[in-house]
Image (cartoon, rainbow, N blue to C red):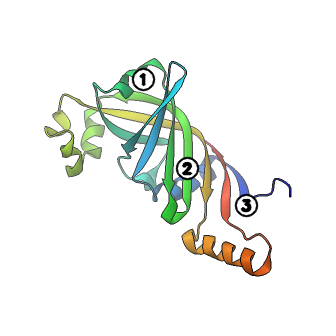
Amino acid sequence: MGNESNYESQHLTGDAALEKIRGLLKHFRSAMMVTLVNGHLHSRPMGIQGDTSKFDGVLWFFSDRESRKIEEIKADPEMSLIMQSDSDSAYLHLFGSASVTDDIGKKKELFTPLAKTWFPEGVTDPRLTLIRFEAERGDFWDSPGGMLQVLAAFTKAVVTGTRGQGGEMGDVKL
C-alpha cells in the first residue's frame, strides 16, 4: 500500500478557497484557538461570532481584555484555529494572525443576548474586546454527504474489498 488516501485532494486559492471555507464554517459554532507562548502551544475553545456565510478571510471572537490570550496575541499575533464537526464529517484548520480591537461598531454588529452571559453590561462593558483573526491559509477534510457518505464508503470497502471514497481534503490559500 502506498500513501493513498480515501479523500480526493484539492488545492484551492482565491474565491474557490473562500467558497470552500464558507461552506465548511456553517458546521462550526466554536473553534480551538491556538497561540504560541514562549515556544509552547496554548489552546482554548472560543465561540465564533457573526455570519460565517459571508466569510471574507476574517473571523471574530469576543474576549475579556484581561485574559491571558490577549497578552499572548499582542506578544505574537500568529495563531491557528481548529474546528471539528464529527456529525458532519467536516474539519478545518486555519492559520493566520490575530489582532485586538475595541471597534464599537463591530461590537454592536456582533453582540448577541448570549454574549451578555460573559459581558452583562453589553457592548459598553469595559472588559469586552474583540479578537480579529485574519486567515492566510488552511487545511480541510470534508465529506459533503456527511455521515451517509462515510457509511457508504465503509459499506463499499466491506462488500467489495476496495477503498471507498471518503470525501475531499486539501489546502486553501487566501
Kindly identify the amino acid type of the residue bearing the numbered disc 2: Leu
| The one of 161 and 24 positioned closer to us in this rendering | 161
Residue under the image location 13 percent in, 37 percent down: 121
Tell me how far mark 1 sits from mark 3, CA to CA: 37 Å
| The one of 76 and 19 positioned closer to us in this rendering | 76
| Quadrant assignment for the C terminus | top right
In this rendering, is residue 9 above or below 172? below
Percent across and percent down for residue 126 are 18, 28
Q: What element carries label 1?
A: helix
Kindly identify the amino acid type of the residue bearing the numbered disc 1: Glu
Of callouts 1 and 2, the N-terminal one: 1
The residue where tag 2 is placed is: 92
* Residue at the outermost right position: 1
Of callouts 3 and 2, the N-terminal one: 3
| The one of 134 and 82 positioned closer to us in this rendering | 82
Evaluate whether residue 26 shows in this view.
Answer: yes
The residue where tag 1 is placed is: 72
Percent across and percent down for residue 84 are 50, 53
Q: How busy is the neighbourhood of tag 2: few (under 14 within 10 Å), some, or many (20 plus)? A: many
Percent across and percent down for residue 159 are 74, 81
Residue under the image location 49 percent in, 65 percent down: 87
Residue under the image location 27 percent in, 24 percent down: 66
In this rendering, is residue 154 above or below 87? below
Kindly identify the amino acid type of the residue bearing the numbered disc 3: Glu
User: In the drawing, what numbered circle is on residue 8?
Assistant: 3
- Say left or right for 31 vs 110: right
